[in-house]
Amino acid sequence: MYNMLVRRRSGTMTSMMYRLVLFVTLLAVAATAFAPAVTSRAPASAAATVGSALGMGLFDGLFGGDSPLSAAQDTRVAEASHILLTGPTAAAECEQLKVQIYKDALGWFGKPEDGVEPEKLIKAFGNKARATSTCPSKAQGGSLGYFPRGQMVKQFDDVAFGAQVGIIHGPVETEFGSHLILITDRTE
């Protein structure tokens, strides 16, 4: 009789363990199925460092309505390059640089109405950043890489996460000086 109880109890324990493993597996599959998809070329490590444990996609906005995310809850990342100029004439110099960059990107035979190829704009921007920027990022052509919302000063952040991707914005005035900003990618 004791042996029957031990066998039944061990069979019940095995069944319970099997059910627990099955439940945990299904829970993990369901959590990944409802997680937001990454549609950007941002490295996975950038998104992972910004992500929140509660940002599960399915439950976003469930209790908060349609209120916009605060910077702490915003899991987006942006990739941008910039040119920083300082001094009393920095804003005017930024305006002139912006025109020069677009002219360089268009080349001799380009027509402004045809638009600018993104690769040529990025290259022209990087060349001007190396030649004129006062920021240490000029060594990388002004590239700041990927960064989360809230990492930069507010004026810079507002442009990086609110303005159109693929065009030069600025001059943007911050405590550091006047910036030209080229947003090259952003997760939505």
Image: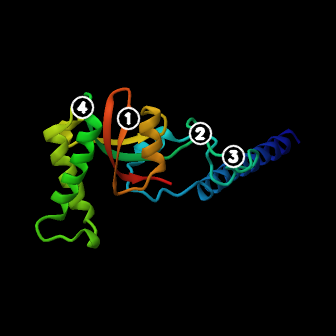
Residue 32: percent from left, percent from top: 59, 54
Q: Are marks 3 and 4 in contact (CB under 8 Å)?
A: no
Three-letter amino acid code of the residue under disc 3: Ser
Of the numbered discs 3 and 4, the one sitting upstream in the chain is 3
Three-letter amino acid code of the residue under disc 1: Glu
State the residue at coordinates (10%, 67%): 108
Of the numbered discs 2 and 4, the one sitting upstream in the chain is 2
Of the numbered discs 3 and 2, the one sitting upstream in the chain is 3
Q: Are marks 1 and 4 in contact (CB under 8 Å)?
A: no
Badge 3 crowding class, 10 Å Cα cut-off, few under 14, some 14 to 19, many 20 or more, is few
Residue 173: which disc?
1
Q: CA distance from mark 1 to mark 4?
A: 14 Å
State the residue at coordinates (25%, 68%): 112
- In terms of secondary structure, where does tag 3 sit? loop
Q: CA distance from mark 3 to mark 4?
A: 36 Å
- In terms of secondary structure, where does tag 2 sit? loop
Badge 1 crowding class, 10 Å Cα cut-off, few under 14, some 14 to 19, many 20 or more, is some
Badge 2 crowding class, 10 Å Cα cut-off, few under 14, some 14 to 19, many 20 or more, is some
* Relative horizontal placement of residue 133, taking residue 168 as reference (left or right): left
Residue 106: percent from left, percent from top: 18, 64
Of the numbered discs 3 and 1, the one sitting upstream in the chain is 3
**Residue position for label 2:** 73
